Image: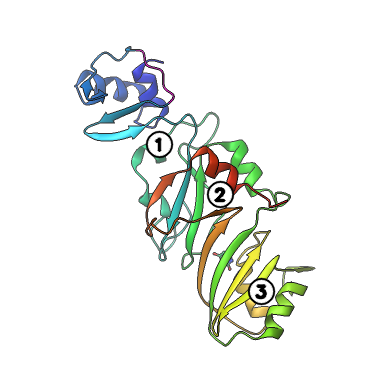
Amino acid sequence: MQLQDILYSQGFGPRRLCTGLLQNGLVAVNGETVTDPAADFEPDGLRFSVEGKSWEYHAKAYLVLHKPGGYECSQKPSAWPSIYTLLPAPLRQRPVKGGQPGVQAIGRLDQDTTGMLLLSDDGAFIHRMSSPRHHVPKVYEVGTADPVDAKQVARLLAGVVLDDDPRPVQAAACEATGEHGLRLTLTEGKYHQVKRMLAAVGNRVVTLHRSRMGSLALPDDQAPGQWRWLTPEQLVAVADRGQ
Ligand code: URA
Protein backbone atom coordinates (compact mmCIF):
# COMPACT_ATOMS: atom_id res chain seq x y z
CA MET A 1 0.00 0.00 0.00
CA GLN A 2 1.36 3.43 -0.87
CA LEU A 3 2.42 5.45 2.16
CA GLN A 4 0.18 8.36 1.17
CA ASP A 5 -2.80 5.95 1.20
CA ILE A 6 -1.73 4.54 4.56
CA LEU A 7 -1.66 8.05 6.06
CA TYR A 8 -5.03 8.84 4.53
CA SER A 9 -6.60 5.63 5.87
CA GLN A 10 -5.32 6.41 9.37
CA GLY A 11 -6.93 9.84 9.47
CA PHE A 12 -4.03 12.15 8.70
CA GLY A 13 -6.28 14.32 6.55
CA PRO A 14 -7.26 14.65 2.89
CA ARG A 15 -5.00 12.93 0.38
CA ARG A 16 -3.28 16.13 -0.76
CA LEU A 17 -2.42 16.89 2.87
CA CYS A 18 -0.98 13.38 3.34
CA THR A 19 1.07 13.82 0.16
CA GLY A 20 2.30 17.18 1.50
CA LEU A 21 3.31 15.66 4.87
CA LEU A 22 5.46 13.17 2.98
CA GLN A 23 6.94 15.64 0.49
CA ASN A 24 7.83 17.97 3.36
CA GLY A 25 9.84 15.26 5.09
CA LEU A 26 7.49 14.97 8.08
CA VAL A 27 6.96 11.19 7.90
CA ALA A 28 9.39 8.49 8.99
CA VAL A 29 9.26 4.70 8.85
CA ASN A 30 11.70 2.76 11.05
CA GLY A 31 13.41 6.05 11.90
CA GLU A 32 14.07 6.92 8.23
CA THR A 33 12.35 9.87 6.58
CA VAL A 34 10.29 8.84 3.55
CA THR A 35 9.46 11.61 1.08
CA ASP A 36 8.04 9.54 -1.80
CA PRO A 37 4.22 9.50 -1.42
CA ALA A 38 4.07 6.36 -3.59
CA ALA A 39 6.59 4.39 -1.49
CA ASP A 40 5.09 0.95 -0.91
CA PHE A 41 4.77 -0.67 2.54
CA GLU A 42 2.94 -3.64 4.00
CA PRO A 43 0.46 -1.81 6.25
CA ASP A 44 -0.23 -4.55 8.83
CA GLY A 45 2.00 -3.99 11.84
CA LEU A 46 3.53 -0.85 10.32
CA ARG A 47 4.81 1.75 12.76
CA PHE A 48 5.57 5.18 11.47
CA SER A 49 5.86 8.70 12.78
CA VAL A 50 4.24 11.90 11.60
CA GLU A 51 5.78 15.16 12.78
CA GLY A 52 7.71 13.16 15.37
CA LYS A 53 4.65 11.42 16.85
CA SER A 54 4.65 7.68 16.46
CA TRP A 55 1.62 5.85 15.14
CA GLU A 56 0.59 2.26 14.55
CA TYR A 57 -1.40 1.13 11.50
CA HIS A 58 -4.80 -0.37 12.27
CA ALA A 59 -7.11 -1.38 9.41
CA LYS A 60 -10.03 -0.78 11.79
CA ALA A 61 -9.93 1.07 15.08
CA TYR A 62 -11.11 -0.61 18.28
CA LEU A 63 -10.36 1.46 21.37
CA VAL A 64 -11.04 1.47 25.05
CA LEU A 65 -11.28 4.86 26.76
CA HIS A 66 -11.33 5.39 30.51
CA LYS A 67 -14.05 8.01 30.48
CA PRO A 68 -13.51 10.64 33.14
CA GLY A 69 -16.37 12.43 34.89
CA GLY A 70 -17.37 15.79 33.43
CA TYR A 71 -17.40 14.70 29.78
CA GLU A 72 -20.34 14.07 27.46
CA CYS A 73 -20.37 11.16 25.03
CA SER A 74 -21.92 13.31 22.30
CA GLN A 75 -20.05 14.73 19.30
CA LYS A 76 -21.96 17.94 19.94
CA PRO A 77 -22.09 18.27 23.71
CA SER A 78 -24.52 20.67 25.33
CA ALA A 79 -22.76 21.69 28.53
CA TRP A 80 -19.56 19.67 29.09
CA PRO A 81 -16.58 18.87 26.89
CA SER A 82 -16.95 15.95 24.50
CA ILE A 83 -15.09 12.68 25.09
CA TYR A 84 -13.91 13.02 21.48
CA THR A 85 -11.62 15.88 22.57
CA LEU A 86 -9.66 13.22 24.53
CA LEU A 87 -8.65 11.49 21.29
CA PRO A 88 -5.90 12.52 18.87
CA ALA A 89 -7.09 14.11 15.63
CA PRO A 90 -6.34 11.09 13.36
CA LEU A 91 -8.78 8.94 15.36
CA ARG A 92 -11.46 11.60 14.88
CA GLN A 93 -10.74 11.95 11.17
CA ARG A 94 -10.33 8.36 9.96
CA PRO A 95 -12.29 8.04 6.70
CA VAL A 96 -15.32 5.77 7.00
CA LYS A 97 -16.98 4.55 3.79
CA GLY A 98 -20.51 5.90 3.65
CA GLY A 99 -20.40 7.12 7.24
CA GLN A 100 -19.34 9.88 9.56
CA PRO A 101 -15.53 10.07 9.79
CA GLY A 102 -13.71 8.88 12.86
CA VAL A 103 -14.37 6.46 15.68
CA GLN A 104 -17.77 6.48 17.39
CA ALA A 105 -18.60 5.63 20.98
CA ILE A 106 -20.45 2.34 21.36
CA GLY A 107 -23.32 3.30 23.61
CA ARG A 108 -23.11 6.21 26.00
CA LEU A 109 -22.22 6.87 29.58
CA ASP A 110 -23.73 9.84 31.43
CA GLN A 111 -21.67 12.97 31.89
CA ASP A 112 -20.99 12.12 35.53
CA THR A 113 -20.33 8.37 34.93
CA THR A 114 -16.73 7.19 34.72
CA GLY A 115 -15.15 4.04 33.34
CA MET A 116 -14.98 1.78 30.38
CA LEU A 117 -16.15 3.06 27.01
CA LEU A 118 -15.50 1.40 23.65
CA LEU A 119 -15.04 3.31 20.43
CA SER A 120 -14.68 2.02 16.90
CA ASP A 121 -14.98 2.90 13.23
CA ASP A 122 -16.17 -0.60 12.34
CA GLY A 123 -19.87 -0.17 11.59
CA ALA A 124 -20.68 -3.88 11.82
CA PHE A 125 -18.96 -4.17 15.23
CA ILE A 126 -20.71 -1.03 16.54
CA HIS A 127 -24.05 -2.38 15.35
CA ARG A 128 -23.49 -5.81 16.88
CA MET A 129 -22.30 -4.44 20.22
CA SER A 130 -25.14 -1.90 20.44
CA SER A 131 -27.88 -4.33 19.51
CA PRO A 132 -30.27 -5.07 22.40
CA ARG A 133 -30.06 -8.74 21.33
CA HIS A 134 -26.33 -8.80 22.01
CA HIS A 135 -26.40 -9.29 25.76
CA VAL A 136 -22.85 -8.36 26.73
CA PRO A 137 -22.70 -8.11 30.53
CA LYS A 138 -21.58 -4.71 31.80
CA VAL A 139 -20.46 -4.30 35.39
CA TYR A 140 -21.10 -1.06 37.27
CA GLU A 141 -19.65 -0.01 40.62
CA VAL A 142 -22.33 2.09 42.24
CA GLY A 143 -22.00 4.48 45.18
CA THR A 144 -25.35 5.16 46.80
CA ALA A 145 -26.79 8.02 48.84
CA ASP A 146 -28.55 5.73 51.32
CA PRO A 147 -27.34 2.48 52.83
CA VAL A 148 -27.80 -0.61 50.67
CA ASP A 149 -29.89 -3.38 52.21
CA ALA A 150 -30.64 -6.99 51.32
CA LYS A 151 -34.18 -6.09 50.24
CA GLN A 152 -32.87 -3.63 47.63
CA VAL A 153 -30.43 -6.22 46.31
CA ALA A 154 -33.21 -8.84 46.09
CA ARG A 155 -35.52 -6.42 44.24
CA LEU A 156 -32.79 -5.47 41.74
CA LEU A 157 -32.22 -9.15 41.03
CA ALA A 158 -35.93 -9.96 40.81
CA GLY A 159 -36.61 -7.04 38.44
CA VAL A 160 -37.98 -3.52 38.78
CA VAL A 161 -40.35 -1.61 36.53
CA LEU A 162 -39.02 1.61 35.02
CA ASP A 163 -41.34 4.41 33.96
CA ASP A 164 -41.11 3.89 30.17
CA ASP A 165 -41.59 0.11 29.97
CA PRO A 166 -44.04 -2.18 31.77
CA ARG A 167 -41.62 -5.12 31.45
CA PRO A 168 -39.40 -5.35 34.51
CA VAL A 169 -35.64 -4.99 34.09
CA GLN A 170 -33.43 -7.08 36.29
CA ALA A 171 -29.78 -7.14 37.21
CA ALA A 172 -27.93 -10.21 35.95
CA ALA A 173 -25.90 -10.01 39.18
CA CYS A 174 -25.95 -7.68 42.16
CA GLU A 175 -23.98 -7.61 45.39
CA ALA A 176 -23.37 -5.07 48.12
CA THR A 177 -19.75 -3.93 48.19
CA GLY A 178 -20.09 -1.80 51.30
CA GLU A 179 -22.69 0.12 53.27
CA HIS A 180 -23.09 2.59 50.40
CA GLY A 181 -21.84 0.44 47.52
CA LEU A 182 -23.20 -2.03 44.99
CA ARG A 183 -21.75 -4.01 42.12
CA LEU A 184 -24.42 -4.38 39.49
CA THR A 185 -24.23 -6.39 36.26
CA LEU A 186 -26.61 -5.46 33.44
CA THR A 187 -27.05 -7.07 30.05
CA GLU A 188 -29.08 -4.25 28.51
CA GLY A 189 -28.44 -0.56 28.21
CA LYS A 190 -31.53 1.54 28.70
CA TYR A 191 -31.31 5.30 29.21
CA HIS A 192 -30.01 6.08 32.75
CA GLN A 193 -30.70 2.45 33.58
CA VAL A 194 -28.63 2.13 36.74
CA LYS A 195 -29.85 5.44 38.14
CA ARG A 196 -33.48 4.58 37.40
CA MET A 197 -33.16 1.06 38.82
CA LEU A 198 -31.70 2.42 42.05
CA ALA A 199 -34.44 5.05 42.23
CA ALA A 200 -37.03 2.28 41.74
CA VAL A 201 -35.79 0.54 44.92
CA GLY A 202 -35.79 3.78 46.91
CA ASN A 203 -32.08 4.64 46.76
CA ARG A 204 -30.06 7.14 44.71
CA VAL A 205 -26.82 6.87 42.73
CA VAL A 206 -24.10 9.30 43.79
CA THR A 207 -21.18 7.76 41.89
CA LEU A 208 -21.21 5.40 38.93
CA HIS A 209 -18.26 3.66 37.31
CA ARG A 210 -18.29 0.98 34.59
CA SER A 211 -15.51 -1.43 35.44
CA ARG A 212 -16.03 -4.29 33.01
CA MET A 213 -17.61 -5.27 29.69
CA GLY A 214 -17.91 -8.91 28.70
CA SER A 215 -14.92 -10.63 30.25
CA LEU A 216 -12.63 -7.60 29.94
CA ALA A 217 -11.94 -5.35 32.92
CA LEU A 218 -10.80 -1.77 32.51
CA PRO A 219 -7.06 -2.04 33.22
CA ASP A 220 -6.05 -0.64 36.63
CA ASP A 221 -3.15 1.24 35.08
CA GLN A 222 -5.32 3.03 32.51
CA ALA A 223 -5.93 6.48 34.01
CA PRO A 224 -9.11 8.53 33.49
CA GLY A 225 -8.90 10.25 30.11
CA GLN A 226 -6.49 7.68 28.64
CA TRP A 227 -7.36 5.62 25.56
CA ARG A 228 -5.74 2.45 24.24
CA TRP A 229 -6.00 0.19 21.20
CA LEU A 230 -7.74 -3.09 22.03
CA THR A 231 -5.66 -6.15 21.25
CA PRO A 232 -7.40 -8.91 19.21
CA GLU A 233 -7.71 -10.96 22.44
CA GLN A 234 -9.29 -8.02 24.30
CA LEU A 235 -11.64 -7.45 21.39
CA VAL A 236 -12.94 -11.00 21.75
CA ALA A 237 -13.16 -10.58 25.54
CA VAL A 238 -15.31 -7.39 25.45
CA ALA A 239 -17.85 -9.09 23.19
CA ASP A 240 -18.00 -12.16 25.45
CA ARG A 241 -21.58 -12.85 26.47
CA GLY A 242 -20.41 -15.31 29.09
CA GLN A 243 -22.34 -18.28 27.69
N1 URA B 1 -26.74 3.68 33.78
C1 URA B 1 -26.86 4.99 34.10
O1 URA B 1 -27.77 5.38 34.81
N2 URA B 1 -25.91 5.83 33.64
C2 URA B 1 -24.86 5.45 32.88
O2 URA B 1 -24.03 6.28 32.51
C3 URA B 1 -24.75 4.09 32.56
C4 URA B 1 -25.69 3.21 33.02
Q: Secondary structure at mark 1?
A: helix
Q: Nearer the viewer, residue 45 or 72?
A: 45
Give the image location of residue 182, x and y in percent: 58, 75
**Rendered view: 206 above or below 138:** below
Crowding around mark 3 (Cα neighbors within 10 Å: few <14, some 14 to 19, many 20+) is many
User: In the visual, does 67 lie left or right of 130?
Assistant: left
Q: Secondary structure at mark 2?
A: loop
* The quarter of the displayed image where residue 154 is located: bottom right
Q: Is mark 3 within 8 Å of ligand 1?
A: yes
Q: Nearer the viewer, mark 1 or mark 2?
A: 2
User: In the visual, does 157 lie left or right of 66?
Assistant: right
Secondary structure mostly seen in the magenta stretch: loop
- Residue type at tag 3: Met
C-alpha distance separating marks 1 and 3:
37 Å
**Rendered view: 193 above or below 225:** below
Q: Residue tagged by mark 1?
A: 93
Q: Residue tagged by mark 3?
A: 197
Does 135 appear in magenta? no
Q: Residue tagged by mark 2?
A: 106
Give the image location of residue 174, x and y in percent: 66, 72
Q: Nearer the viewer, residue 228 or 217?
A: 217
Q: What segment carries the magenta color? A: 40-44
Q: Is mark 1 within 8 Å of ligand 1?
A: no
Q: How many marks?
A: 3
Q: Nearer the N terminus, badge 1 or badge 3?
A: 1
